[in-house]
Image (cartoon, helix red, strand yellow):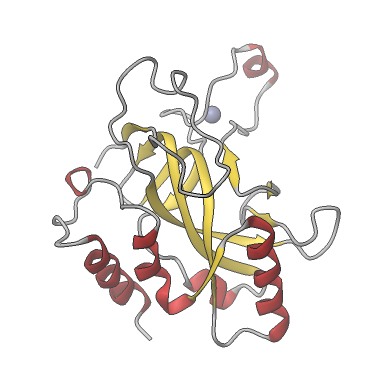
Amino acid sequence: MSPITITVEPVAPPAGRDTERAHPHGAGHGHAPDLIEPVVGFRNWRILRTGPARGQLSSPYFPVAWPEPVMRAECRRWRTPEELLDTPHAAPQTECGCGIRAYHTPTGEFSRVDYLGVSGIVTVWGRIEIGADEMRAELARVEALAVYSRWSRRQRDAAQEVATNLGAELVDLRELGAAAASYGAPPPASLLADPPPTGIRDRFVALFTSRMGD
Ligand SMILES: [Zn+2]
């Protein structure tokens, strides 16, 4: 499928939270939003163990720390001198590939094989590019981090510390899919190749079971 761009503007932040909101008129260029509820997705991070950002989440592929619960996308692509003269664009942009990435289905395998790795749940909103397997979003909030039962005490403590600092929930890795239903809905089924879900929770449980096994 070709990527689809939607705009999501939560009407109100989740109860009891100090939430940074999408700019009310910037992302959608004046168009009405396609959705008014956060879209839920899954991500992996590494927990930085050294340096000034010790104890923070980092993107697994770029040296980008996640010091706050809410991250706003910036275009970080490498630029040629000529490109530096171009006007910077807001992330995500369709052709560029920038934006905060989140997968449609749980990605717990990463945290089983990478000793710094941790998987979790995010909600995304603002401008979102939706592809077959992943989304690239303008804004993302860390909602939950998953603990793997076979982790060392040190790994578990590290994840606990990050979750506390971000105000995120800790869930068992096996519950990652089911827990996501607490935070929002997946991208509209009509935009994806999968058959429509019978219920959000059923959908996540089914996806989780098919991906994670155990
Ligand atoms: Zn870009």
Instruction: Say if 60 sits above or below 49 in the image.
Output: above
Instruction: Say if 177 sits above or below 148 in the image.
Output: above
Q: Quadrant of residue 58?
A: bottom right
- Image x and y of residue 158, in percent: 71, 72
Task: Name the residue at 22% across, 48% down.
Answer: 192
On the picture, is 29 further left or further right than 69? left
| Residue closer to the observer: 146 or 38 | 38
| Residue closer to the observer: 134 or 124 | 124
Task: Name the residue at 20% across, 49% down.
Answer: 189
Task: Name the residue at 52% across, 29% down.
Answer: 91
Ligand 1's quadrant: top right
- Image x and y of residue 19, in percent: 55, 41
Instruction: Say if 181 sits above or below 155 in the image.
Output: above
- Image x and y of residue 148, in percent: 54, 80
Q: Quadrant of residue 37?
A: top left
Task: Name the residue at 19% across, 51% down.
Answer: 193
Quadrant in the picture for the N terminus? top left
Q: Quadrant of residue 163?
A: bottom right
| Residue closer to the observer: 56 or 170 | 170
